[in-house]
Each structure stands twice: as C-alpha cells, then as structure tokens.
Image (tube, helix red, strand yellow):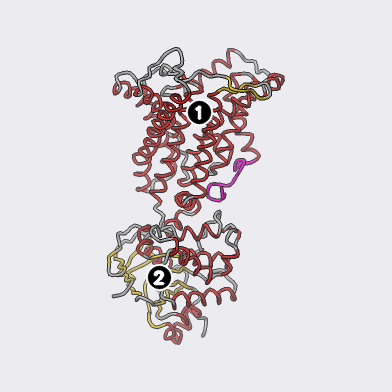
C-alpha cells in the first residue's frame, strides 16, 4: 500500500484546469520528484495534497485512507507537512517562533519529544541555531529555505512535501540543501519534491514524474529518467 | 448619528472657536488624567478593531455595537444582582464593591464576547464560505451595526419588560461615588479613574502577553502574516478568527464597564457609535493591525482630545480626535507604530 496515492486528480482555477487527471503514488520511505516547466501543475498538485486547493474531481489517499475531504489543518495532524513554494517564512517572527509554528499541531508531544525534534533540526541546520532570535524576514534566501524545511520537520512529518526548495538560491547553497534533503530521506522521512533543477533532483530521487500541461507524461526511476534522451533534451538543456 | 447633528447645531449656535492655551496649561495634569481614563477605554475597544483587521483585513464596523451590548450586559448584571437605579451611590465598602464590579465585569465580557463571536458566525462566516469580495463584508458590517442598534432600541425592551433598552438611556446605577484619592501636581485622581486606568493596563498587558508569548497568540500572528502557510502548519484559520473576535469582544465588554463607571448615563442603544469611531481612529492612529499600536493610539487619542477640548472649547472635543487622525495619517499613512500585526513582532 502506497503512503500517498493520487487518483485521477483534477484541479481548476476558474475554468482553466491546472491539473488534468494526474495519478501518482509515493511509497513509504521514497524520495519522489515532480519535474516540469512553469505552469505544468506541480505546485497545484502539492497544494491539493495539503488541502489548500480544492479538487474538481479525483481522490487523495494517505496511508490507506481517503483524505480527499479532510481539512487542510487536519492533514498536518495526520502527518502531511509542506514547506511551500517561496518558503512561507513568517516574516515578523523569530527563527525560534517560526520553528515553534512548525510544532503547532504537535499538541500531544512531551517536552522531551519536542526538544529532541528541535535538537535534530539544529543538527541538520546549525545556522538556524545561531540565528534563533533573528526575525524571519531578515534572513538570507538560503537561511529562509533552511528555516522552511526545519519548521516542517518540527511537525514530525510522515510525508514531507517540498515545493521548489532550490528556487532563487546560489549553486553552493542548492548543493547543501539537496544534501540535507537526501539525509532527511535517508533517516526515514518520505519526501515528495517539486523541482525545476531537474539534474540535481533526478540524481537523488528514487522515482520521478514528469508533468506537462497538467498531465503526467513520463515516469520512472530517477537515474533512468536522467539517462532518457527525451528528458535530457527537454529538461536538462542537453541537445 | 443624532449626536453628530446635535454637535453641528451647537457649532452653528456658537460659531466661536476658542483658543485658550492658558486653560491647557492650568489644567494640564487634570486633563492628562481624565484623558488617560478615556484613552484606556478607547485602547481596549481599539484592540478589537485591530485584531480582526489583522487576521481578516476587515474593518468590523459593528464592533462599536459589541461595546454597546457590553454596556447593557454590565447594566443587566447589576439589575440581576438586585441593584436598582438610584440617585445616590450604593457605597457598599471597598471589598463588596470590588466583588460587584468584578461580577459586572464578567457579565459585560460574556455578553460582548458572546455577541462578537455570534456576529462572526451569523454575518461574516457565511460570506467567507462564499468567497464574497471585501466590499460586501464592509456593507454587512455596517448593516449588522444597525441591526444590533435597532434590536436594543425596539426588541430588547419587549424581551425585558422595559427594564433594558428602548429609546432612552438607562437610569444610572452608581455603585461608587467618585472620591479623590490623591493628587499629582495639584490634579486630583479619583478612585474610579485609578480603577479604570490600572485595570485597563492590566488587561492590555495580559492581551499583549497572550498574543506575543503563547501558542494560540502565535497562531493568530501566523494567520495575520501568512494565512496559507499558517494552515500548512496545522493552524485552523476558522478557529483563529473566532478567537480574535472573542478577545476583541471580551475587551470591549471590559471597556463597557469602565465607560459606565466614568459616564453612568451613557448606556443607550446609540451609545457605542461615536466611541466606536474614536476607538477605530485610535487603532488607525497607532497603526491598524498592530496590537501595541492600538493601545498607544487609544491612550494618545484620549489625552489629545482633552487637551484640544481645553484649548478650543468643549464642543470641539470630537473634532480634535478626528483632526489628529487626519494629521497623523498625512505624514505617516501607516500610523504611529506603522507595521501591521503581521509584520510587527509586537
């Protein structure tokens, strides 16, 4: 049984369908990537999974349960946590407050559980510990991305959704973020990743789906797709 | 509305604007203390405008009526406690008076807080579900304001056997006589003024701590700063909205008690209107959406309007408040503390 399954998902903005009948699965423990050009429907799919974008048709299954009608904030409780496109750092809150927002849904955690999660986040992102009292809006782009991922981890997700974590970052920082993503996945967190940086994403993914105009056009293993001539030409800028 | 027309008539009858800086200088401390008394009432009401604006970007014009209902809540509680209108104050001794005031405070808070949440449920939530444009919310707010006023005007007296509501102000119930307790720089301070200013400061402090240092407060700020991301963190936006209306209502209920202590004859169906506009101005003055801005704006407005009244004459009191607002906004359109609840750490 897959951890996440999207069945024939359609999402429309008014009369324009941004996602047209997407079906995909994410198995427990996998790192799965959606790649595609701007407007291919990647972010819309992520928003639908998190429940902040209503579906026209189709259903979403998480851990064997139909969550299509589940409210967005309840999905966080269920274990689906997203670091959104553009990072969504609360600009007026400190790093520490932002991290606490990540733990908002963890009402029943003991202090020890909470502290060990926090310690793990600081271990992955030592920079966040240094900046814990700094206000979110004054962080650099890379630090904000670290904060967005660290904050999502504070919710102890079963499925972590990362929407374009490399957007607008310097190459060195992108390397660093991808290393950490791989590490988070290696320690047992299932990840669904949206990326435009296809090279990096595919080389680190178990599987990937390629989206075009709201539909899945190809899918397969990450390295497999990386070697596919058609994919190379369309997404990796190799003739 | 009627009081606006009334003020206009007075101006016509007496076209002179005084300009007496001496009156301000002579009574400076007395004016300051009275101004702080009114100002702390404005501040508490202003919090309701600013919090709701922070999370919904909605100016809840019906908030003045929530305050007015709070006054009736206070008065109704006193009636239930067995007090009846009388010329003289009851003066039951300090411990009993504090007890009765405490019960009246809770009564006012329950009525105002409850009706604020009810208003949100009945008037605004259905619009939100339909994704109505913001202009519709504004018109609804004004409509709700009239509905509540007319409810107290016409329906409440029928429900209470004429004891509450109706066209006239309630006959005052005075629990305590104002007594001078001490003086600073020659200006006397009464027991009532101390009670109002101190209680308002305590409530303001509690509210500030709640918003800035608790998990629920953090949830409110998160929704104000970025509602979508807040949802992604597991915050229920609907619950946050309800909570902000509740906080605003409860503080308006407290302000209602304080106002009836200062102005015992002010309990009337139309009695929230001008005060509400001033509290809203206070919120804008401090920077709407900003909690500490609302508190500061309220105190400032209360003090400035009394200074203005001393300089220009009594009739000009309300005018001063609004001229001050216009002046501040001309030079600082985002208000004194500027940033919104969203941006500011406060």
Residue at 54% in and 37% down: B283
Instruction: Report the disc number at residue B275.
Output: 1
The answer to whether B61 is drawn above or below residue A107 in the figure is above
Distance Cα–Cα, label 2 vs label 1: 56 Å
Residue at 45% in and 24% down: B97
| SS of the residue under disc 2 | loop
Is B341 colored magenta in this rendering? yes
Q: Quadrant of residue B105?
A: top left
Q: Nearer the viewer, mark 2 or mark 1?
A: 1
The answer to whether A104 is drawn above or below residue B41 in the figure is below
The answer to whether A127 is drawn above or below residue B284 in the figure is below
**A169 and A180: which is toward the camera:** A180
Tell me the magenta residue range.
B332-346
| SS of the residue under disc 1 | helix
Taken as a whole, is the magenta stretch helix, strand or loop? Answer: loop
**B254 and A204: which is toward the camera:** B254
Which residue has dot 2 on it? A213
Q: Chain of mark 1?
A: B
């Amino acid at each position: 049984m897959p951890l996440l399954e999207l069945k024939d998902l359609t999402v429309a903005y008014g009369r324009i369908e941004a996602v047209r009948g997407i079906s995909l699965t994410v198995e427990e423990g996998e790192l799965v990537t959606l790649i595609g050009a701007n407007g291919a429907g990647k972010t819309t799919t992520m928003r639908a999974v998190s429940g902040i974008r209503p579906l026209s048709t189709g259903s979403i299954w998480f851990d064997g349960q139909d969550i299509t009608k589940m409210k967005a904030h309840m999905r966080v409780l269920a274990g689906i946590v997203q670091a959104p496109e553009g990072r969504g750092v609360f600009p007026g809150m400190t790093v520490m407050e932002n991290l606490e927002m990540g733990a908002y849904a963890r009402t029943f955690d003991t202090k020890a559980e909470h502290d060990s999660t926090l310690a793990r986040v600081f271990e992955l992102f030592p920079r966040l510990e240094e900046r814990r009292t700094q206000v979110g809006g004054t962080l650099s782009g890379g630090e904000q991305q670290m904060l967005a991922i660290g904050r999502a981890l504070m919710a102890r997700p079963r499925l972590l959704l990362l929407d374009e974590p490399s957007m607008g970052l310097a190459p060195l920082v992108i390397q660093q973020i991808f290393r950490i993503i791989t590490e988070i996945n290696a320690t047992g967190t299932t990840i669904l990743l949206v990326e435009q940086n296809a090279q990096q994403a595919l080389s680190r993914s178990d599987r990937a789906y390629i989206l075009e105009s709201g539909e899945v056009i190809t899918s397969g293993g990450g390295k497999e797709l990386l070697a596919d001539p058609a994919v190379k030409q369309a997404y990796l800028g190799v003739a | 509305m009627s009081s606006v027309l009334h003020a206009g008539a007075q101006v016509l009858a007496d076209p002179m604007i005084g300009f007496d800086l001496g009156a301000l200088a002579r009574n400076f401390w007395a004016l300051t203390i009275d101004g702080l008394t009114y100002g702390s009432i404005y501040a508490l009401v202003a919090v309701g405008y600013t919090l709701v604006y922070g999370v919904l970007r909605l100016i809840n014009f019906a908030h003045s009526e929530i305050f007015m209902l709070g006054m009736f809540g206070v008065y109704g509680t006193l009636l239930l406690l067995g007090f009846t209108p009388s010329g003289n104050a009851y003066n039951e001794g300090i411990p009993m008076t504090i007890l009765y005031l405490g019960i009246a405070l809770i009564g006012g808070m329950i009525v105002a807080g409850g009706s604020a949440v009810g208003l949100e449920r009945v008037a605004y939530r259905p619009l939100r579900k339909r994704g109505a444009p913001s202009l519709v919310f504004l018109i609804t707010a004004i409509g709700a304001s009239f509905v509540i006023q007319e409810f107290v005007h016409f329906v409440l007296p029928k429900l209470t056997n004429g004891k509450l509501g109706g066209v006239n102000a309630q006959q005052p119930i005075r629990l305590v006589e104002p007594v001078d307790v001490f003086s600073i720089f020659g200006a006397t301070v009464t027991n009532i003024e101390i009670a109002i200013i101190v209680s308002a400061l305590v409530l303001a402090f509690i509210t500030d701590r709640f918003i800035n240092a608790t998990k629920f407060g953090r949830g409110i700020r998160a929704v104000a700063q970025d509602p979508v991301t807040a949802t992604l963190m597991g915050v229920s936006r609907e619950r946050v909205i309800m909570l902000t209306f509740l906080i605003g209502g409860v503080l308006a209920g407290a302000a209602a008690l304080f106002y009836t202590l200062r102005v015992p004859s002010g309990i009337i169906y139309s009695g929230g209107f001008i005060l509400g506009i001033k509290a809203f101005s206070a919120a804008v003055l401090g920077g709407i959406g900003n909690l500490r801005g609302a508190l500061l704006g309220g105190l400032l407005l209360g003090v400035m309007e009394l200074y203005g009244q001393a300089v220009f004459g009594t009739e000009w009191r309300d005018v001063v408040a609004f001229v001050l607002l216009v002046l501040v906004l001309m030079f600082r359109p985002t208000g004194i503390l500027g940033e919104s609840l969203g941006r500011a750490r406060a």
